[in-house]
Amino acid sequence: MSPDVDLTVPKPGHHVLRERLLALDCKVFEFAAASHWPGAERVLPGLSRSANHGVLWFATAAAMAASRTPRARRAAARGLASLSLASVTINTLGKRSVRRPRPVLDPVPLVRQLKRQPITTSFPSGHSASAAAFAVGVALESPSWGAAVAPVAFSVAASRVYTGVHFPSDVLAGAALGAGAAFAVRALVPPRAQALPPARPRAEVPALPDGAGLVMVANTGSGSADRVRALRDSLPAAEVVECDPADVPAELEKAAARARVLGVCGGDGTVNAAARIALRHGLPLAVLPGGTLNHFAYDLGVEGVRDLSRAVQRGEGVRVDVGRFTGGGQEGIFLNTFSLGVYPELVRERERWSSRIGGWPAGVLAALRVVRADRHPLEVQVRGRATPLWLLFVGNGTYHRMGLTPGRRLDLAGGQLDVRVVHGGRHPAVRLLAAALAGPLPLPHSRLRPSEGHPHPAHTAVQVGRLRLAGVAPGTLLAYDGELTEVDGEVRVEKLPEALTVYRPPIGG
C-alpha cells in the first residue's frame, strides 16, 4: 500500500477547511498569473532556471568564500549544509508524501513559462526549500551576508509561482521546510556567535577613537597585507610596522617602548611573542588575526579589522589567563595549547618535508611516519612510575565540543588547565582516533593512569591548576602555540590567572 496522497482526489465526506484552503490557493495562483510585475518577465524565469540543482547557491557560496573572511566562509558552508539537508528531506519525504500535480499553465503568459517544465510532483517546492535553507543558514552565521542573500532567495521562491510551476502553498511549505533545515543544522553545529566567551572579567583599557597610541606590528610572512590596509583606513592615527618574521620580536620590543597599546597582526606564534612582551611591559594587547588558524583571536571574538577597531575605539577589554611552562632551562608562555609527544613530532616532520613536497602532502607523510614509529615519542614519570604516552595536551582553559564541531573555549579566564593524555600502547592510530572521537569532554577525578581504574584505557582528561612531569628525556620536543622547543628533566606547567589584558569587541556591538 502506498502512503502517497493526491490532494486533487476527492475523499469521502466533506472537508470544508481543506477545500477552502485549496480554493484560496488556486485564487492566489490565478491572481499572480494575471498580475504584471515590472521587469519580472526578464528576470524571474532566468533566476528560477539558475537555481536548478542548487547551481545558483553553490555559485553564491563560492563568491562568499572568495571574500577571504572567516565569517563569510563559515556562512557559505552553513548555507550549503542547510541546503543539502533540505534537499534530502524534500526528495525522500516531501514529494513522496503528497503527490500533488503541477498547476495548469493556461492562465500563465507564455513569455513567463519555463522552456523545460518540471516533471516531479508539485508539493512542496524544492527550489523554495533550497533558497530558504541557504538564506537562513547564511543569516544564522552572518546577518550581514544573510541580508544580502535574502532578496535573491525571496525572488527565487516568488519565481516559482510567477512562472506557473508551483502553487503558493507549495512555495510556503518549501520555504518553511528549508528554514527548519537551517535551524536543524544550527542545533548540530552552533554558530560561532553563539559561543563567544563571557565579557568578563572586564578590564580598563584606553579608548582610542582614531587609533592614536596603538602601535601595530604586522608579520608580513603571514600574508596580512589586506588586513593592514584595512586597519589603516579604520584607525588612521595608529602606527603600523610591517616586518619579516625574523624581525618581529625586535620590532615588538621597540613598539612596546613607545605605545599605549601594543598591537600584533599575525598567527598564533606571533601573538604569543607579543603577549610575552605585553606582559613584561604591563601593556594591553590588541590582536588582529593574520595567520592560518588564529585560535586565540577567534576564541576572543576578534575575526577581523572591524571587530578589533570597534573594541579599540570604544575601549572594550577583558583579562584572560596565560599558561606558563618551565623545563630543561626553557621557559615560556602559551595562550592556546602546550603539548608533548605525537603532535610536536608531527610538526617537526612536516617542517622537514614541506619545502620539498608542499604543506598538505608533508602533513600526511608526517602523520604516517609518526604513528608507525616503533617507539612512544614520550615517556614521563607519574607518581614515581615511568609511563609511556603518545600525547600530552594542555589547554589554556577548557575546550568544549560545540555540537559536531571541534572543541573551542567558552571562557578564557576560567583558571584551569585542560589536560588530556593518550596513553602508550599498541595501535597508536586507533588510540589517537578514539581520543579525538570522544571529544573534549573532561572526565572527573582522573589520575592520568588507566591502571588505576579510569573508565577508558586509551585516554584521560582532567582539569588542574598546575602540572608537574618528571623524567622527561633530553631532546624531547615541546610545542606551544605552534612553536617548537626542546625540554628535559622536570617540566612544570602552571596557570597565570587573568594575567593578560586584551581588547575584545562587545557582544552585539
Image: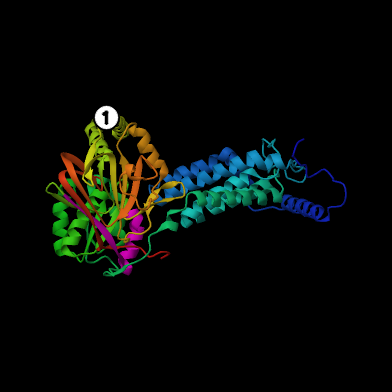
Q: Residue at x 38, y 37 (%)?
A: 433
Decide which of 276, 415 is in the foreground and name it.
415
Taking 488 as reference, is 135 left or right? right
The extreme front residue here reads 452
Q: Residue at x 38, y 48 (%)?
A: 440
Q: Quadrant of residue 17?
A: bottom right
**Taking the image as drawn, is residue 465 in sight?**
yes
Indicate the amino acid at tag 1. Answer: Ala
Decide which of 436, 4 is in the foreground and name it.
436
**Taking the image as drawn, is residue 290 in sight?**
no
Residue 150 is situated, as x and y percent measured from the top left of the image, at 55, 53
Q: Is residue 482 magenta?
A: no
Count neighbours of disc 1 (C-alpha within 10 A) and say few if under 14, some if 14 to 19, many if 20 or more. few
Residue 57 is situated, as x and y percent measured from the top left of the image, at 53, 43
Taking 276 as reference, is 396 left or right? right
Q: Is residue 310 magenta?
A: yes
For the C terminus, which image quadrant?
bottom left
Q: Quadrant of residue 342?
A: top left
Q: Which residues are magenta?
A: 297-326
- Element under disc 1: loop
Which residue is under mark 1?
Answer: 373
Decide which of 447, 212 is in the foreground and name it.
447
Mark count: 1
Residue 252 is situated, as x and y percent measured from the top left of the image, at 17, 56
For the N terminus, which image quadrant?
top right
